[in-house]
Image: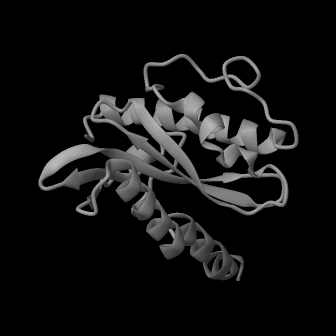
Amino acid sequence: MKTRLFILFFVPLVLAAFTVPDNVAKKAHKEMVKFYGTENISKEIISVPKDLNYKTISEFGDENLFKINSGGKLLGYGYIGNAPSKTATFDYLVLFDKNFVITTSKVLFYREEYGGEISSKRWLKQFEGESPTSKELVYNRNIIPISGATISVRSLTSEMNSLLKSIAILQKSNIF
């Protein structure tokens, strides 16, 4: 009986965690079109084997890690993530160049009443230029705090650190 309850309730939650919702994917696509300045963008999903995914801190599931191409040319890479805020979560997009240096990041959907200041371009700009070989990002040292958004700032900083460490693991495993 316990096994059946586990399968009925837990498995669908796990499967749902690996899928990028349509509204998030559409907004991410819009942001990529704006960033690259062309409508002619295609995503090529990068599949990470389960055994390798277990070795990473970030979760790589359906459609959240991809190559970005235009006219048969590689423009860069993208990652769509979801991070906790005080009582909800927020979705974000990170774009990398061909060498996995962060070129831009964007908070796609922020679901809290307070803390939305992490969506500002000015604040997000501090992640640009970071790469898997960069030093760790530290709240209140090289990441500026935002009054009223402490939890979200710490969360996104942690997510960025995890993503960069995870990308380094994938690079060593020749996934790209």
Can you see residue 19? no
Report which quarter residue 89 is drawn in.
bottom right
Residue sitting farthest toward the left = 72
Looking at the image, how many numbered discs can be counted on the residues?
A: 0
Can you see residue 128? yes
Residue 110 position (above or below residue 51): below
Is 36 displayed left or right of 13 in the figure? left
Q: Residue at x 57, y 36 (%)?
A: 160
Q: Residue at x 65, y 44 (%)?
A: 120
Instruction: Identify which residue, 38 or 18, lies in the foreground.
Output: 38
Instruction: Identify which residue, 149 or 134, lies in the foreground.
Output: 149
Q: Quadrant of the N terminus?
A: bottom right
Q: Residue at x 28, y 52 (%)?
A: 68
Residue 163 position (above or below residue 49): above
Residue 11, horizontal then vertical, whole percent = 58, 73
Residue 67, horizontal then vertical, whole percent = 28, 50
Q: Residue at x 68, y 25 (%)?
A: 143
Residue 74 position (above or below residue 64): above
Is 65 displayed left or right of 1 in the figure? left
Q: Quadrant of the C terminus?
A: top left
Image coloring type:
one colour
Is 149 displayed left or right of 169 in the figure? right
Residue 69, horizontal then vertical, whole percent = 22, 53
Report which quarter residue 162 is drawn in.
top right
Residue 129 position (above or below residue 154): above
Residue 92, horizontal then vertical, whole percent = 57, 52
